[in-house]
Amino acid sequence: MTRAMARREGGFTLAEMLVAITVFTVGALGVMAVHTATSRANQAARRLDRARSLADQVMESVRGTPMATLAPAVPTVVPLADKTIDGVVYHRRYSVSAHPLSGNLRRVWVQVTYGDFGDENDLHAVTINLIRTAAEAL
């Protein structure tokens, strides 16, 4: 075996190793970025689902209330106690008002707002509207 052949068979050069490490690092950073983005998207979806669930609970509570107690003379927004779940504060409120087309109908509006990732300046909201009749009995 000649000295030139022995040098070629000796392994990787420093330049080849640096290129391989660079390619691996760029790939690993890409995987980490995708993981972070997916994690944040899952958290946002979980918070939105909780807000929707809280709005559904308020709506069902209002639907179970007799119509006579849901007939305010002046439409008002009724704030409910805030709920904190996993460090996120959910602000709940609802309103019941007479429907303009019929005195037999009531418009029920429920809204739940929350700050994304603890930021109360970046509010998200879930709103549910319902038209309820005086004859509706649950």
Image (cartoon, rainbow, N blue to C red):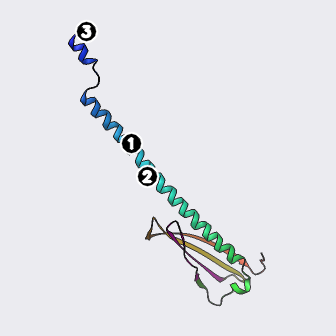
Quick check: is 126 in the magenta stretch? no
Residue placed under numbered mark 2 in the picture: 36
Dominant SS of magenta comes to strand
120 horizontally vs 96: left or right: left
Q: Residue 83 lies in what quarter of the image?
A: bottom right
Residue type, numbered disc 3: Met
Would residue 62 be seen by someone viewing this image from the given angle? Answer: yes
Residue type at the position of mark 1:
Ala
Q: Which residues are magenta?
A: 78-97
Q: Which label was assigned to residue 1?
A: 3
Q: Amino acid at mark 2?
A: Thr
Question: Depth-wise, is mark 1 or mark 3 nearer the camera?
Answer: 3
The spot of residue 94 in percent (x, y) is: 60, 78
Q: Nearer the viewer, mark 2 or mark 3?
A: 3
Mark 1 in CB contact with mark 3 (< 8 angstroms): no
In space, the residues marked 1 and 3 are separated at their CA atoms by 40 Å
- 110 and 54: which is toward the camera: 54
- Closer to us: 13 or 40: 13
Crowding around mark 2 (Cα neighbors within 10 Å: few <14, some 14 to 19, many 20+) is: few
